[in-house]
Amino acid sequence: MGLASPSPFRYHAAMAERPTSSFSLNMLNLAGYFIVPAVGIPMLVDLFRSDAPGRWLASGLLALFTLFYATRERILKAAPWGSYLYTSVQTLLITALLAMPLHPLIAVVLFFVLSAEVTMMYPPRAIVAWLTLFSLITFIAYAAVGGIRSALVVTPIYVAGYAFFAIFALQTAKAESARAESERLLLELQNAHRQLQAYAAQAEELAVQQERNRLAREMHDTLGHRLTVSSVQLQAAQRLIPSAPERAGQMVGAVLEEIRAGLGELRRTVATLRAPVEADLALGPALKRLTDDFQRATDVTVHLSVADDLPELAANQRRALYRGAQEGLTNIQKHANARAAWVDLTRADDAVTLRVRDNGVGLDANAGDQAGFGLSGLYERATQLGGSLTVGPAQAGGVELLMTLPLAPEQTHG
């Protein structure tokens, strides 16, 4: 029943098979709980006041109707055909009240309650059939009391009432279905948000791992190489001490110079790779600390310029710009043979730009187009933020690293 009904009526068909808690709390049920006593109390008062002989039978029929109405959810759950049982019994109870010799026509109003309920329980064709049956019973009841002419006048009023309650129930069901869909979408969005947070945490962990790998490679390529050479030279000097002490002394002196150079490279690498204290420092102070440490470790003069109109940057934007400056200075220390470097952080209308350049020897023509691990990581950072990264010759000589990140609308207008 209703399994093949169109989508607007899927909710109503499902109600007949599995009533939900919201079914007992909506406005239709409140209206039903109001209509039943509004009809029953005046009818019983009139019957008992006139000392009508069928008053106890009418009271029993009305009590049964009220009992079925109060327990309808259990009836609907009892069997797949529970909805037909419930509607049929309630229709028979109302018809029995109307067929009594007392002719309590006010009982017709109880069909308003059933009109709303059948709309919640049946597919469209069944709804029309039940409403037609209610209208026919109403016509017969009024025709038996006041004649066909009276029935033709009064019945359309009740038919309009049945249609109103049916439409009201339909709109209520649609609203309930829309609410359930909204809750489902909200749950999906919450799950998607949690997944995105997990992905962001994984990306952050991967970035940290990449930085660690880079640092390990830097240590291996610089300090590791020098220590290896020094170890070999010390072993050779040790063998030469008995036979050629002067030659051994020269080799020890060379090892000493090698170790000093290695320590210098270690200090420069640590100074360049040092991360900003992001919890305490904004990007400007963090860059100031970075350039000061680099200048002390390398004797390369660094000119820092940070725009005064920078907006409030997100953490991933600050991190990307800081890493850009860090990588640029590292490359200057390793390859440029420069005497001075410039780090400029500026803002356009909808973007922020980092420029790192030097007055060194420029790009190696034999290096090809392959970027190092650090530059590849920077390019990925910039791309993930919708920006760009370029490395090329500077206009005044040397090399220029240029990173541009777009600003969000709230950053632009903030």
Image: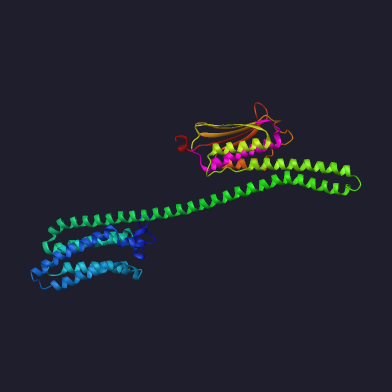
Whether 260 is drawn above or below 358: the answer is below
User: Which residues make up the magenta segment?
Assistant: 312-340
Asked if residue 104 shows in the view, the reply is no
Expressed as whole percent of the image width and height from the top left, the position of residue 406 reads 52, 36
Name the residue rendered at 26%, 67% in the picture: 70
Q: How many marks?
A: 0
Quadrant of the snapshot with the N terminus: bottom left
Expressed as whole percent of the image width and height from the top left, the position of residue 48 reads 10, 70
Horizontal arrangement in the rendering, residue 60 relative to residue 337 (left or right): left
Q: Looking at this rendering, what residue extends furthest in the top direction?
A: 396
Q: Looking at this rendering, what residue extends furthest in the left direction?
A: 50
Whether 377 is drawn above or below 303: the answer is below
Quadrant of the snapshot with the C terminus: top left
Dominant SS type (magenta) = helix
Q: Nearer the viewer, residue 413 or 11?
A: 413
Q: Residue 188 sits in which quadrant?
A: bottom left
Q: Looking at this rendering, what residue extends furthest in the right direction?
A: 243
Expressed as whole percent of the image width and height from the top left, the position of residue 211 reads 63, 46
Q: Which color scheme does this rendered protein use?
A: rainbow
Name the residue rendered at 72%, 47% in the picture: 220
Q: Nearer the viewer, residue 275 or 261?
A: 261
Expressed as whole percent of the image width and height from the top left, the position of residue 132 reads 25, 60
Name the residue rendered at 81%, 41% in the picture: 254
Whether 272 is drawn above or below 44: the answer is above
Q: Nearer the viewer, residue 263 or 335?
A: 263
Asked if residue 290 shows in the view, the reply is yes
Q: Residue 144 sits in which quadrant?
A: bottom left
Q: Is residue 281 rendered magenta in the image?
A: no
Q: Residue 286 sits in which quadrant?
A: top right
Q: Nearer the viewer, residue 380 or 29?
A: 380
